[in-house]
Amino acid sequence: MYGCPGRGQPFFGKRLDVIPVGEWNIFPEGRPLMIAGPCSAESEIQVMDTARGLKSLGINVFRAGIWKPRTHPNTFEGVGAPGLKWLQRVRSELGMKVCTEVACGKHVFECMKYGVDMVWIGARTTANPFLVQEIADAMRDVDLPVLVKNPVNPDLDLWIGALERFMQTGTRKLGVIHRGFSSSGKIKYRNSPEWQIAIEMRSLFPELPFFCDPSHMGGDRQYVKEISQRSLDLGLDGLMIESHCDPACAMSDAAQQLTPEALGDVIRGLIVRRPDSDSPVYKENIDQLRAQIDAIDENLLYMLSSRMKISRKIGEYKRDNNIAILQTSRWDSVLEKVTAAGAGYGLPEHFVKAVFNAIHEASVQVQNEILSGTDSK
Ligand code: PEP
Ligand code: MN
């Protein structure tokens, strides 16, 4: 029975009662499942030009934001309902399926009026249970597939809670999109991947189609390929990528959008790891495990650098107060604490000690440099 301890009632049964994505009548056969289109629908010409370019790549599912949640007021907040007519034209002229973001019940009703094929819930909306409930209620008894993006904050439970709301109101064509999480620290990407959260979500609900949105995760078109590959390496099912016929002129998210041509290059360069690949099962498993290890290593490095920054601050504080670097009792108690905690995680004592001694050594060295005035920063 699925249910995290302390999370309240276990939810439904072992597996969610969802309809397999192959039966949604949205995506063509094969992997990755592809969704592409501009961040925002801006004009009929921009929508049609972009859609034609994508169609020629063999992409069959078109995205475009009609209502845009923007950080600042008085910026472009989407063209609103009139843009739905342009999506209708994409459907009828190009035979593509169309999807857009809904952020309240009214958006759902507008989408249904114009025959939108699928909707997604944006990261800011997933973080708001009242709005998710309103949308789920609006979709009650409607056969509309929905993809739920992760909330902006790295909270797996909040993400799962949104899925639960849709399940409870009868949505059975349900999937998720990983677009990364806001971070207060300075990181390479616009949103921190926190792959371990995606991996946990995937293992809890392997039956849900799982997309990655490398555009919002990376925040820059140069990262779309590496993030897409990473997510395919992890075995995710699909990609949602922003594409604009003229990215430089885009009214939102200009830096992260690719022309359809450039997107074609990215897609052709991707290595798709199919579960039914004829390569040996063993190799497939190893590759996926290694991708997880790489993601965790990246997190470890980030954590180590955060720890080092604090060590540096402590060094400066000791210097200003004329205090010696080493207080052996403090270090003894840290070692005692981490080896005990490590044992709780099943880690051998010698391993934990070796790791923490190395960390301590580096941090003493940094403080030494600070006290002696030889540090480079
Ligand atoms: C979007 O897909 O255009 C969007 C606003 O994404 P997110 O909710 O992930 O920020
Ligand atoms: Mn966008």
Image: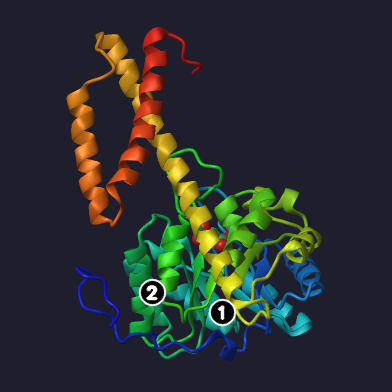
* C-alpha separation, residue under disc 2 versus residue under disc 1: 24 Å
Q: Which residue is mark 2?
A: 204
- Classify mark 2: helix, strand or loop: helix
Quarter-of-image position of residue 170: bottom left
Q: At which x and y percent is residue 90?
A: 72, 77
Tell me the quadrant of the picture where the N terminus can be found: bottom left
Q: Which residue is mark 1?
A: 118
In the picture provided, is 255 more to the left or to the right than 321?
right
Residue at image point 35% right, 26% down: 311
Residue at image point 43% right, 59% down: 196
Label 1 packing within 10 angstroms: few (<14), some (14-19), many (20+): many
What colouring method underlies this structural image? rainbow
Between 285 and 295, which is closer to the camera in this rendering?
285
- Classify mark 1: helix, strand or loop: strand
| N-terminal label among 2 and 1 | 1
Quarter-of-image position of residue 306: top left
**Residue 144 visible in the displayed image:** yes
Mark 2: C-beta under 8 Å from nearest atom of ligand 1: no
Indicate which label's residue lies in the foreground, 2 or 1: 2
Q: Is residue 324 above or below residue 10?
A: above
Q: Is residue 352 above or below residue 243?
A: above
Q: Amino acid at mark 1?
A: Met
Q: At which x and y percent is residue 225?
A: 68, 57
Badge count: 2
Q: At which x and y percent is residue 41?
A: 66, 64
Q: Is residue 53 above or below residue 326?
A: below
Residue at image point 69% right, 49% down: 222
In the image, farthest residue toward the front: 350
Q: Amino acid at mark 2?
A: Leu
